[in-house]
Image (cartoon, rainbow, N blue to C red):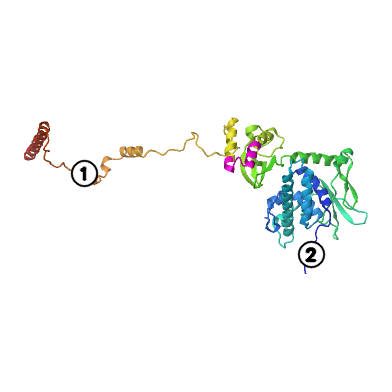
């Protein structure tokens, strides 16, 4: 009989402690994944799994097979929603919906990744998981804790957390990483910038890093916060009735865009270049605090709110409303495309015209030798039958009779002329 799968033995508070720094840095959308209510039907999405490496690494540090009770994940998601509801401006129903959404995302990614790791031939993306290779970590020191277990210590710059890994029988660190508790930022800021970084682990043991200073960590935290501001959603809401999630976010295509999403589907977009310029090389994301991004956000919110409330009935009407509003503001000029891009349209704005068939026929006749033109047999419509002789009507006038008689005299003279020409020949 197969042994029962080992589940995380810790408490909700243990999970919240290690997740809080990630939530603080990445914001409301700290994890994006399939939201199916049944984990067995959740899709395998390598791109989103890669984007969630920081989250997965934290949870793997707590439980290496990513096996957590669903009730515990639900409790953690609810606690996050309640703790940040004022900061994220979540109303009563939205708090509940957010907790359900994050519970499904967390459970689904745990199941998909955990199941893939157990396969004899795992998919390629499994080998890219952050705990599969620790060669890029920045510590090489090994020492023993109070119980005599030998560890290798390191600091993960992507997580801004210290870690330790037990030394195996071969003398090399194992891949079973244990993350340190999140540092207290206020306490760190009171320490000298050149002091060694202190780390505390869940069992209470401590370690100080010779090659990582407090000043370096504070600087990395500030840099992470600035970079992350471009990843957060600009605005979120939901549709009335269906409760579909509506999000306004930056998106990079051939140009930087501000896109409107319903669930995960894009339903409209605007180029923020209408409202200003951007620093650095484009296209790329910029901080959400950039003036042009904020002006685009303010422009879209009233229109998207009407869509959420049902005043705008569908995505097609939403696009029309955006275009009309842009025209009202005077943004009618077509923006230039990025370098190398082409716009398929004529310079005059009119469709290409075909050459008139009559003109072609006329020119071809002028360029053709008249001898080469073949004569066609005339059709029945082209043959004109001679007029039949009819007796004059009884009520014909004298003038009419005179005209008829004159025509008959001319006909007789014409026939006589033809006969004379024939006799002379």
Tell whether 96 sits left or right of 306.
Answer: right
**Mark drawn on residue 282:** none
| For residue 40, above or below residue 251 | below
Query: For residue 315: magenta?
Result: yes
- For the N terminus, which image quadrant? bottom right
Magenta range: 301-317
Q: Which residue is mark 2?
A: 4
| For residue 207, above or below residue 8 | above
Find residue 41 and report its horizontal and vertical position in percent: 67, 57
Sequence-wise, the earlier of marks 1 and 2 is 2
Find residue 415 and report its horizontal and vertical position in percent: 9, 38
Regarding residue 114, the answer to whether it shows in the image is yes
- CA gap between label 1 and label 2 equals 102 Å
Q: Which residue is mark 1?
A: 383
Q: Nearer the viewer, mark 1 or mark 2?
A: 2
Q: Residues within 10 Å of mark 2 (few under 14, many from 20)?
A: few
Find residue 9 and report its horizontal and vertical position in percent: 83, 57
Q: Residues within 10 Å of mark 1 (few under 14, many from 20)?
A: few
| For residue 289, above or below residue 183 | above
């Amino acid at each position: 009989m197969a042994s029962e799968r080992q589940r995380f033995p810790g408490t909700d508070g243990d999970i919240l402690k290690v997740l809080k720094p990630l939530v603080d840095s990445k914001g409301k959308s700290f994890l994006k994944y399939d939201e199916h209510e049944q984990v067995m039907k959740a899709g395998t999405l390598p791109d989103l799994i890669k984007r969630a490496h920081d989250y997965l690494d934290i949870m793997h540090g707590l439980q290496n097979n990513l096996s957590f009770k669903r009730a515990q994940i639900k409790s953690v998601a609810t606690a996050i929603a309640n703790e940040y509801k004022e900061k994220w401006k979540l109303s009563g129903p939205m708090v509940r919906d957010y907790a359900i959404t994050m519970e499904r995302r967390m459970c689904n990614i745990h199941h998909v990744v955990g199941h893939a790791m157990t396969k004899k031939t795992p998919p390629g993306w499994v080998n890219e998981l952050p705990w599969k290779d620790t060669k890029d970590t920045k510590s090489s020191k090994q020492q023993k804790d109070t119980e005599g277990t030998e560890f290798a210590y390191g600091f993960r710059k992507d997580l801004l957390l210290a870690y330790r890994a037990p030394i195996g029988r071969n003398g090399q660190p194992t891949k079973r990483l244990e993350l340190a508790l999140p540092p207290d930022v206020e306490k760190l800021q009171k320490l000298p910038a050149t002091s060694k970084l202190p780390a505390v682990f869940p069992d209470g043991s401590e370690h100080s890093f010779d090659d990582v200073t407090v000043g370096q960590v504070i600087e990395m935290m500030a840099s992470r916060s600035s970079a992350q501001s471009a990843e957060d959603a600009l605005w979120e809401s939901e549709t009335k009735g269906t409760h579909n999630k509506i999000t306004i976010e930056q998106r990079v295509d051939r140009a930087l865009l501000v896109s409107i999403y319903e669930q995960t589907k894009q339903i409209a977009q605007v180029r923020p270049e209408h409202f200003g310029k951007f620093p650095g090389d484009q296209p790329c994301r910029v901080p959400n605090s950039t003036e042009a991004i904020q002006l685009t956000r303010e422009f879209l919110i009233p229109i998207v709110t009407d869509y959420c409330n049902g005043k705008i009935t569908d995505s097609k009407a939403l696009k029309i409303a955006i275009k009309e509003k842009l025209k009202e503001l005077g943004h009618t000029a077509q923006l230039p495309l990025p370098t190398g891009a082409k716009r398929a349209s004529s310079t005059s704005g009119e469709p290409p015209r075909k050459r008139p068939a009559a003109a072609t026929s006329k020119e071809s006749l002028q360029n053709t030798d008249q001898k080469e033109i073949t004569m066609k047999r005339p059709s029945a419509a082209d043959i004109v039958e001679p007029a039949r002789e009819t007796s004059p009507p009884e009520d014909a006038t004298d003038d009419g009779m005179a005209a008829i008689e004159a025509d008959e005299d001319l006909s007789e003279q014409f026939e006589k002329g033809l006969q004379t020409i024939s006799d002379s020949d």
